Image (cartoon, coloured by chain):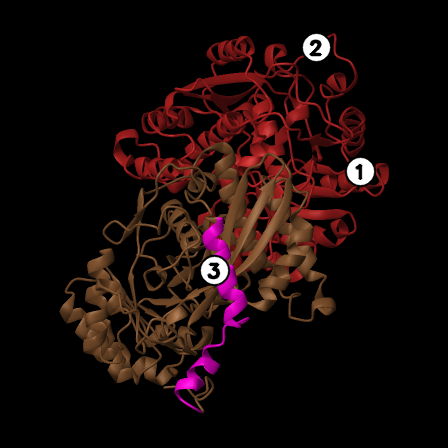
Chain colours: A red, B brown
Amino acid sequence: MKITDMKVTPIAFADPPLLNAAGLHAPYALRIILELETDEHITGIGEIAGGSSVLKGLEEARKVVVGMDPFERNKIRIAIDKTFANLTDSLNIGYAHKGAARRMYSAINIALVDLIGKAIERPACDVIGGKVRDRIDFSAYLFYKYEGAGGRWGFGHNPDARGWDKAKEMEALTPEAVVEEARAMIKEYGFKSIKLKGGVLPPQVECDTIKALAEAFPGYPLRIDPNAVWTYETSVKYAPLLKQYLEYYEDPCKGQDAMARLGHVCDIPRATNMCTTSFEEIPSDIQKGATDIILADPHYWGGMDATIELGRICSVFGRKLSMHSNSHLGISMMAMAHVGVAVPEISYAMDTHYPWQCEDVIKGGRVKFDEGAIVVGNEPGLGVELDHEKLEILHRNYLKCGIKDRNDEIEMQKKVPGWTVSKHIF
Amino acid sequence: MKITDMKVTPIAFADPPLLNAAGLHAPYALRIILELETDEHITGIGEIAGGSSVLKGLEEARKVVVGMDPFERNKIRIAIDKTFANLTDSLNIGYAHKGAARRMYSAINIALVDLIGKAIERPACDVIGGKVRDRIDFSAYLFYKYEGAGGRWGFGHNPDARGWDKAKEMEALTPEAVVEEARAMIKEYGFKSIKLKGGVLPPQVECDTIKALAEAFPGYPLRIDPNAVWTYETSVKYAPLLKQYLEYYEDPCKGQDAMARLGHVCDIPRATNMCTTSFEEIPSDIQKGATDIILADPHYWGGMDATIELGRICSVFGRKLSMHSNSHLGISMMAMAHVGVAVPEISYAMDTHYPWQCEDVIKGGRVKFDEGAIVVGNEPGLGVELDHEKLEILHRNYLKCGIKDRNDEIEMQKKVPGWTVSKHIF
């Protein structure tokens, strides 16, 4: 079997005005959809975070991938690595860094695993060793937010919204409002654990929010993720208060050294998606004892195969595994779900932004949750098919919206003049 | 697809009187052949080192595997782990140790990968991510030896032997004789690098052998493996002499601590198949800096998938990867070859005992070498089929030969009364 083409389609879809340590989500979030076509007319699909450098990089990757056998993903990975290692000057956008090659390959690997699953008529998880569980739990991913819906409504409202769709348009800047947000999301999706995106309001308010969530949802595992804008001192200061509520403490402070020091004085398990985000950063993480839990993400670590390998590393070195997420659509949703049922070491409900979106590029409606989990069936590949009409609509969104790169800081400055990431430290 | 049966057949085949640090090879070597049968009439085959505890263990593993889906090898691995973790007292042969579960699963994993390859009509290497190379080099694996052929000839001769078959019956206890052994093996197989099994004669004689080989085969990468019966002091003493000849220095002395110390005073790359033989031993190897090269073996590390994972660990922690071998037949030969073409990190010619055997259990003659390499083609699975007549012959050998467990020390005592492993230290 040979890959005959790799179609790369940038898309934009409505995203609510969610707040985070880097600023504010723009009305549109960017993704890129990949289609790997073969001479046997089987197509594999993938999805990855958008942006102009990724788009340019995938065009380079395309030259490598076309003509290769989709089953030979080890060879494709190495070819991509070599290509990007040699691109230093011509593109001049940092592609020589291993991370760039890995990001390109991540998207391609997801499409390859989907393609192989379809070719052998087995679910994608079977391509990476098969299910260890039939369903994988996700957490309710809560945000502080401004009022509004994003997308074609800008930051305004959809007058027809009901239920969770209405709730997610509401402002949520207090503990009480976040509890209401949680109630609506959990009612809709059935999640059984909760993650709060922190690093937005003063730490005491965020701790009060965690306390309010703990009281409103007794027994629910809780997490907070200040995205490393708390200082080491702040992280230490709030640890005793948070300890009674938290399942894990995600990136309160910045860097492996600070996280390692935190481990000496705080016995809440420390999770990261910031200080250890690649295989290259694992040795120093281990040596320093920087973290307890790695938040894997097949979109950054090298795809679905790489998450199996990361799982093995975690079991060998006594780390646990959970999952990070960006704003995403249904192809990524299913890639994450297949990884979630296949990787033995994943032992927490995984993160997903999916409830915050309302559009998609897949046929037959959005991916369904069953009591907060995704049940992975036996459909070939990722179990979803690309809807080319929907893809075209979201591609036109991309062309019209004018956003080529995510920049939460600039978006925030539209609301709070003079706001900068560098000064946003607690 | 469901596994309906797992047939476990112990076999014995002729093995020449090869010397090593543990004593002497008996006239018969033991292996166990696995056949995983399915409700879709596709069978996967595997091969593993024999012995009574492995045989008993595989009978336990059989109870777990039957009824499972062969594609779900992550789930099977965990089920085997759990089974052996719970077997402490009933079998009373150390099965509760993780190594036992991993060894059982290793054999099963090879059969699963073969089975899946056959089911999807792709070579076994494609099940673990596909080829990164089309051929994999092996090394000429030289032994000091007594005269004789092993097997039905006991330690006598096959009067019809010619070429390498004749050469391998000759005594080889001097540098000159080992050079002749090398010439015959290399003429027959075309190997381009050489490994000497050491730890047999006094270190100076073994170093002289390496020197003689270097002179007879200029430019050939050389290795010596004293199987950790040299003291730390001896290992240090001979390092300056060996440095000019060796590609790597395999387990000269015993244990991660001694190997780590050796690294401080010796700049020959250190390889191991003794101080780091499982994922559990990796963290201390890394922390101590005990080795430079891990000699993987899918028969011990958890199968073919696990070798991909080990490769990733090696690349992350700056280790290189090569391959260990025991006396084996064609199924193992092909499992090793498929691993060899698929695992990107393997960067040395791999070890194999295959030239020392003359029998096999596969159809169509023994596996062929092409200038010291095995070329992995596109035949489904491992690319070899079990010959049940040959299997029956070697199974009858097993029943007749009376050997149930390998014990090179007892075999050696027949030649050298009073010889003991514990006193065999240089």
Q: Is residue A334 above or below residue B231?
A: above
Residue at position x 37%, y 82% in the image:
B230
- The subunit carrying tag 2 is A
Q: Nearer the viewer, residue A170 or B235?
A: B235
Q: Which portion, as a residue range, is magenta?
A: B388-417
Q: How many marks?
A: 3
User: In the image, A125: left or right of B166?
Assistant: right
Q: Secondary structure at mark 3?
A: helix
Q: Nearer the viewer, residue B100 or A49?
A: B100
Q: Is residue B270 above or below residue A115?
A: below
- Residue B203, percent across and down? 29, 83
Name the kind of residue labelled 1 in the image: Leu
- Residue B302, percent across and down? 53, 55
Q: Nearer the viewer, residue A126 or A327?
A: A126
Q: Which residue is mark 1?
A: A213
Q: Which residue is mark 2?
A: A158
